[in-house]
Amino acid sequence: MDLSCIDIKYSIEDKRILNSVSFNLKNNEFHTILGPNGCGKSTLLKNIYKILKPDSGVIYLNLKELKKIKSKELAKEMAVVAQFNNLNFDLSVREIVLLGRTPHLGIMEKERKEDYEIVDDALRIVGMYDKRDRSYLSLSGGEKQRVVLARAIAQRPSLLLLDEPTNHLDIKYQLEILKIVKKLNINVLAVLHDIALASKFSDYMYLMKDGEIKFQGIPQEVITKQSIKEIYDVDCNILKQENGTILINYL
């Protein structure tokens, strides 16, 4: 599912949070939004997955206006993994992931053999199949996030939105989650905090400040001393290696 945002504006009372944000995501690329706290990153994602409604501008999914797409139809094509998932249901891991099949079922329709196969495949992808019968509440934070990702994968989306999904995890789980997502070969729009980590996995990046996209492009072009200074107001040195890795030394 290709995503286009055109001139998106959003305000809370008299405070402008998003100011004419425009971008395109297609070709199964991994795009990342970075910027300081309060710059509008998560607000932009919430406008895309219809938690919030733009004041003006248009969001298109496969050339169709987002506001004209019914929620159930949208859930068949778009999945969301957020930073915190306060699921307090005493369900098994498999039952949690099975919830990802709900958009594909009719009213009162029970899950079919195919649905269970899709769920088990998703659990294998995230490395949680062996814990499929465990209580979700008994898992560690990193394991819970992998289960939530499996639920999103089970939706079989063509567009995945990640709203700081690794911010509270240690580096092992951060890498595991992003490696899994990268291999899905679907359109991904992620909000991340770690610049070096985002550079490692992103095909394209947006640096936001004060509700606007100030810089955009491939990581090697976007991450510079000048852009980091303007966006985060910190000084640094940038080391760009031949394999594409970007190392940042903050001064």
Image (cartoon, rainbow, N blue to C red):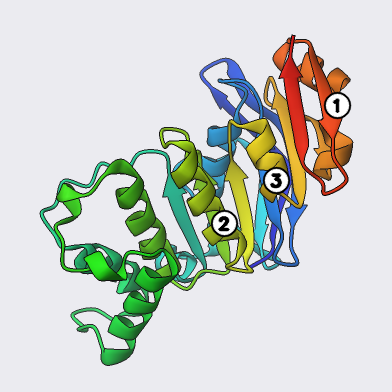
Q: What residue occupies the far bottom of the structure in this picture?
A: 113
Which of disc 3 and disc 2 is earlier in sequence?
2
User: Image quarter for residue 93?
Assistant: bottom left
Label 2 amino acid?
Lys
The disc label shown at residue 224, or none = 1
Residue 220 image point, x, y percent: 86, 40
Quote the CA–CA distance across marks 2 and 1: 25 Å
Q: Nearer the viewer, residue 171 or 40?
A: 171
The residue where tag 2 is placed is 179
Q: Nearer the viewer, residue 74 or 121?
A: 121
Residue 178 image point, x, y percent: 55, 52
Q: Nearer the viewer, residue 210 or 151?
A: 151
Q: How many marks?
A: 3
Q: Is residue 132 left or right of residue 33?
A: left
Res 97 visible: yes
Q: Quadrant of the N terminus?
A: bottom right
Q: Is residue 110 left or right of residue 65?
A: left
Are circles 3 and 1 on residues that touch, CB within 8 Å? Answer: no
Res 165 visible: no
Quote the CA–CA distance across marks 3 and 1: 15 Å
Q: Is residue 133 left or right of residue 196?
A: left
159 in relation to 117, above or below: above
Are circles 2 and 3 on residues that touch, CB within 8 Å? Answer: no
The disc label shown at residue 81, or none = none
The disc label shown at residue 200, or none = 3
Quote the CA–CA distance across marks 2 and 3: 10 Å
Q: Is residue 76 left or right of residue 16?
A: left
36 in relation to 139, above or below: above
